[in-house]
Each structure stands twice: as C-alpha cells, then as structure tokens.
Image: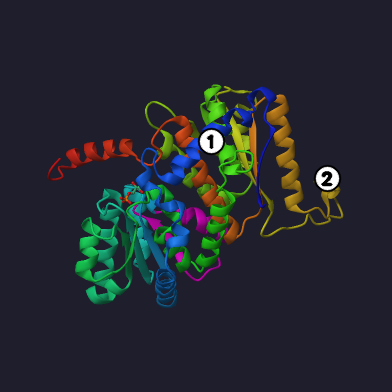
C-alpha cells in the first residue's frame, strides 16, 4: 500500500470513531455505485479508466508524438478543471526546470492583460502548437486567449498549417468550440459529458497535454486503475479514501471550518491548486463546506508558521508527505565549518526534510494542539500520481455526500459569468 492515511496526530477527542459510521458509509458507497445520489450522472470518472478504449489512448499518444516531433512549445489553453489537473501532473512529474524538449505554457486561465501580452509576444519567437480545452466551449477567458493565439498562428504559417497545430478537447456535439473545430478540421478529443471539469484530469483533458510532455499516460491510467481497486471497499475500516473523507467532515462538524493541505515539495504546489478546486467546487454549497487552503513547508513555516502555531484555531492540517524523493543530495564537508554545518555532513537533504516534517508535526499537534491528518506516499512517480488523483476524487464523492450536498454541480460558478456577460454586452444577457 503506497498511500497511507494516518490519524495518529489527531487529538483523541477529535478522532472519528469508525464504528459509528459503518452503516452511513455503506449507504453512501451504495449510492455512489448505484448512481442514485444527487448529481450522480456526473460520476462518469468512477470507471472511466476502464472504459477509455485502446484506440483512443493510441490516438492521443500518436497525436502527442506528432506535436513533440514538429513543435517546441505547447500552449495549453483552458481554465479551472480544463487545465489544473494537467498542470498539477506536469509539475509533479517534471519538477522545477524540466529538461523535456516540449515547453508547456498555460494560457486562457486569466484575463490579466500583462500576462496575455507577454505570452503573445513570447509565442512570436516559438514554434508552437495549441491544445484548447473547454467543456462548454464558450468560457470567455479561454475563448478570447485562443482567438488571439490562433490568429497569430494563422498569420505566421497560414490557416491550413495552423489547423494541423491545433487540438481541441470539448463536448462531443455541443458548443462553439466544437463548431469551430469541425469547421476548421482540427483534431479533437471528446470530453465525456458525464465528467465534470474538476474530475477530468483522467480523460483526454489531462492525458493529451501529459503525453505531449513525454509523460507515460498508460502508466498514469494504471495508477488510476489501482486506485479504483484499492478504494472500492464499502468498509470504512478498509477504505482509506473514505477514512480521510469521514475524518475531514467529522472535524468540520467539530468546528474546524478550514483544511490546510501542506506538502514538503515545491513540485506539488499545483497539485494543491487542483485539490482546492476539487473540494471547494464540489462542496461549497448550501452555506456549507470546509474551506481549503494550502501551504508549502518548510517555506511557509517562516511566514504562515506563526499563525499555524499560535493563531486562530479555525483549521486542521492535512500533510501530504512523499517519503522517497525522485532526486536527492548530500551535505558536503567544509574544512573551515564557519557555518557550523559539519554536524550534517554526509546527510541527505531528504533526511533533513524528514526531520523538519516530524518536528513540525510535534510542534503543531502537541504544542499548538492542531489536528493533523497525515497522508504519506512512498514515492511520487506517474503510477502513484494516478492513484493519488483517484484517492482524492473518491474521497471527495464520499465527503460531499457526508456533508449533504450535491458534489458534482457548480451553480455558483455561473453567477459571476452571467454578470460579466451582461457587463460585456454579450447577446442574450
Ligand atoms: O470544474 C469545472 O467545471 C470548472 O472549473 C470548469 O472546468 C471551468 O469553469 C472551465 O469550463 P469549460 O471547460 O467549460 O471552459
């Protein structure tokens, strides 16, 4: 078992008693599997990894290889669920300075004119291709940015060559992006109707950009399948995804309204952004929900750390800790030892990081009295990342139903869009 959930650092009175929830968890699990709960149409992600055809996977890999051969830069144009999962995975697997030949730029996820200008100017110097992702096909941020770089590309290489450099991922039949793609004969992959954006990283929405970045998507799917198996039990004593879900809602009901997900690795920073969207968009309804926030330790221990140790007690912590790093280094010897570090000579950085993790757990649990859920992952590779995505998705379904909301809609997201459309003068608003 390479993902381990532990409640060892939760105060006894804050620890959920599984015995009290055996039946409730079984009932919800049945509702999930029978697809009889609120919003259950959107449970398509539950078994998608088993349903995606070999043909579709091959098409994704072939098109991605064509992009890798012909271009040096991929612009991934999408917002929210239409890019966060891919960025989370690319960052988690490629790290700080990726050495892969394909550069990836995330675009269409903000209306910041400076960023848009800067990317546009930079793209003038790049041999780029585009992957545009939008389920609705009409999201303003994505559509406006796509129009800009499509236009630039068409002016640079002509309409026909530009069309070959564009892949769109959208609804099979509906929406303006579908129409535009069909008219221009872009290559397309379908975003299944029964999978919401925040659950779509396991579909072409995540798979295609990852394949473009040289990531083995078959291995990611294998990890997802392992997660499907591992988190399939309706027994709360066996299903760790459900245990995590149950404890978070238990703490919420005890007055902890905020969950802080902390990691000890920079490469997981966007994984936390993906996780925030998954939980906030799924649960933030009917005046309820745990508010998610995140931190990167030890960096944030030098800023947020003061608040975590001695500030307002509205939150609990969830620590996502990777036991074995992909790369490591050793502290070298220094003859003078003016910095007084020779006591660490020969020690691995990962060993020091681990001591920081354990020391922080003690400080936050024992001294600050904060509840800490720990989730340890043995090693973060493509397979384990797939499993981890599925772990949090399955937990989210249980958690949302325990909270009593529909975890699969997002009516609140539409409100700002409608107001903005009105102000923009969009026809029909
Ligand atoms: O999870 C969601 O549903 C949202 O984050 C959407 O993915 C986001 O709003 C983008 O929407 P679309 O894919 O329709 O452009």
Image side of residue 359 versus residue 221, left or right: right
Q: Residue at x 38, y 50 (%)?
A: 197
Residue 156: x and y in percent read: 27, 72
Residue segment shown in magenta: 83-108
Q: Nearer the viewer, residue 43 or 396?
A: 43
Residue 293: x and y in percent read: 51, 36
Q: Residue at x 12, y 43 (%)?
A: 428
> Measured along the vertical axis of the image, is residue 271 above or below residue 25?
below
Q: Residue at x 49, y 46 (%)?
A: 393
Q: Nearer the viewer, residue 237 or 275?
A: 237
> Measured along the vertical axis of the image, is residue 10 above or below residue 268?
above
- Residue underneath mark 2: 340
User: Does residue 96 appear in the picture of this structure?
Assistant: no
Q: Secondary structure at mark 1?
A: helix
Q: Residue at x 37, y 48 (%)?
A: 196
Mark 2 and mark 1: span between their CA atoms? 54 Å
Residue 25 disc label: 1
Could you say which quadrant of the image residue 368 lies in?
Answer: top right
């Amino acid at each position: 078992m390479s993902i381990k959930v532990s409640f060892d650092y939760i105060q006894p009175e804050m620890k959920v008693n599984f015995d009290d929830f055996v039946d409730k968890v079984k009932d919800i699990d049945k509702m999930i599997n029978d697809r009889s709960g609120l919003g259950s149409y959107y449970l398509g992600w539950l078994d998608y990894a088993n349903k995606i055809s070999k043909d579709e996977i091959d098409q994704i890999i072939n098109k991605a290889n064509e992009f890798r051969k012909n271009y040096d830069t991929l612009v991934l144009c999408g917002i929210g669920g239409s890019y966060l999962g891919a960025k989370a995975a690319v960052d988690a697997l490629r790290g700080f300075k990726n050495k892969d030949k394909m550069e990836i730029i995330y675009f269409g996820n903000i209306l910041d004119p400076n960023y848009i200008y800067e990317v546009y100017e930079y793209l003038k110097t790049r041999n780029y291709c585009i992957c545009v992702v939008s389920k609705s096909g009409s999201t303003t941020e994505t559509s406006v940015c796509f129009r800009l770089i499509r236009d630039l590309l068409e002016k640079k290489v002509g309409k026909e060559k530009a069309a070959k450099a564009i892949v769109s991922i959208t609804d099979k039949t509906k929406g303006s992006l579908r129409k535009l793609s069909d008219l221009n004969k872009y290559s397309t992959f379908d975003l299944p109707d029964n999978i919401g954006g925040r659950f779509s990283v396991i579909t072409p929405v995540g798979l295609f950009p990852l394949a473009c970045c040289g990531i083995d998507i078959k291995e990611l799917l294998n990890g997802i399948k392992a997660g499907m198996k591992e988190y399939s039990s309706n027994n709360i004593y066996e299903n760790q995804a459900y245990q995590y879900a149950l404890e978070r809602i238990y703490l919420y009901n005890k007055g902890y309204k905020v969950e802080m997900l902390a990691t000890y690795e920079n490469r997981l920073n966007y994984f936390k952004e993906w996780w925030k969207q998954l939980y906030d968009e799924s649960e933030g309804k009917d005046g309820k929900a745990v508010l998610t926030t995140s931190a990167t330790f030890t960096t944030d221990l030098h800023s947020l750390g003061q608040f975590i140790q001695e500030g307002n007690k509205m939150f609990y912590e969830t620590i996502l800790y990777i036991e074995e790093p992909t790369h490591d280094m050793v502290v070298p010897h220094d003859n003078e030892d003016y910095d007084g570090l020779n006591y660490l000579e020969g020690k691995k950085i990962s060993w020091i990081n681990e001591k920081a993790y354990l020391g922080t757990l003690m400080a936050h649990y024992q001294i600050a009295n904060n509840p800490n859920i720990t989730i340890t992952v043995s090693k973060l590779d493509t397979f384990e990342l797939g499993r981890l995505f599925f772990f949090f998705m399955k937990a989210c379904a249980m958690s949302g139903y325990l909270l009593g909301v529909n975890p699969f809609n997002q009516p609140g997201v539409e409100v700002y869009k409608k107001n903005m459309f009105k102000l923009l003068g969009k026809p029909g608003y």
